[in-house]
Amino acid sequence: MTRVPKLPLALVAVLLAPGCGGERPAATRVSDANVVEITAVERTFQAPDSAPAGWITFRFRNASTLTHFAVVERMPDGIGIAEQQEQAAPVFQAGMDLLAAGKSDNAMAKFGELPAWFGDVVFLGGAGLTAPGHVSEATVHLEPGTYLLECYVKTDGVFHSFNPDTSAYGMVHQLTVTGPASSMPEPQADLTLTLSGQRGIEVSGDPVVGAQTVAVHFEDQTTYSNFGGHDVHLVRLAGDTDLQQLVTWMDWTQPGGLQTPAPAQFLGGLNEMPAGSTGYLTVTLEPGRYAWIAEVPHADANGMLLAFSVPAGG
Ligand SMILES: [Cu+2]
């Protein structure tokens, strides 16, 4: 496994501080940081059970051999991990099994059995697709409440968030966000992505070699045919990366979609958020070719695939 070199946050803060040769704004002071450490160990999350409200950085360490993400979901009142695992996860898996068998009408009927509360779940970002051995960071603002971290990447046709062994939960973790809010300030961004169903992914600023904070503004939101909205993930493009295969892979409703192994190396991202929201991710780039891509069907046709290069010394 390879690991992207990751500077300790304290060192990043020093390097990015004004007067240290960089022109970037100072990174968040360590003393104010509100960090939730998440570790993926095979198909489980290891993470704390609670965190203070306000700006929260999710630092996602993938210590497994599979690609994962950790989407943050605000649950409706009275709904938590038990309801998600008992009432929603089995329906998604049964629907996926029908899709894989080519029975799309039956699958849609199955998805119609999702509990009414599922429509009130709010997706609020969280760490995007992250390759084995890598660490990614996503920062979002959360109000007090009950949240789940979920990974619905698939392996052998089974969502990670669904455990066929009913004696254990799937790759879902409940996090209680409590008041009062922490003193962590909103991050300051080096570049900004604007996501729009109309105009796709737009970038303001130039990605450079090294660590940088990326603001992601969700100008609007759309429900695509995979029932989800747009988000953004960072993928390293190798010489043999097949972009069309990558695009197909980003649609979980395809039998091979979101199924491990991933067709390229993912370096994090920011999962779906509501229209008008802004979240942040921290990325460390080396010279090379990359792409921003959303986990939606037909990301290319929907304007949700944007390749870019990071020049050496840039
Ligand atoms: Cu996973």
Image (cartoon, rainbow, N blue to C red):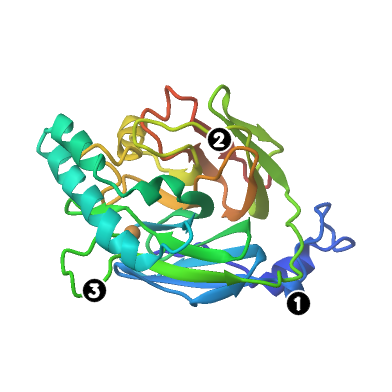
Q: Quadrant of the C terminus?
A: top right
Sequence-first disc among 3 and 2: 3
Residue 298: where, in percent of width, then height?
Answer: 37, 28
Please tell me whether mark 1 sits on a helix, a strand or a loop: helix
Give the residue type at disc 2.
Phe
Work out which quarter of the rendered image holds the N terminus and state it: bottom left
**Residues tagged 3 and 1 counted as in contact (Cβ below 8 A):** no
SS type, badge 3: loop
**Nearest the eye: 131 or 173:** 173
Q: Compare residues 101 and 178 and report the one nearer the observer.
A: 178
Amino acid type, residue under disc 1 in the picture = Ser
* Ligand 1: quadrant of the figure: bottom left
- Residue 31 tag number: 1
Residue 259 shows in the view: yes
Q: Residues within 10 Å of mark 1 (few under 14, many from 20)?
A: few
Residue occupied by mark 2: 308
Q: Residue at x 27, y 70 (%)?
A: 169
**93, 306: nearer the viewer:** 93
Q: Amino acid at mark 3?
A: Ala
Residue 168: mark in rendering:
3
Residue 269 seen in this snapshot: no
In the rendered image, the vertical position of residue 134 relative to residue 300, given as above or below = below
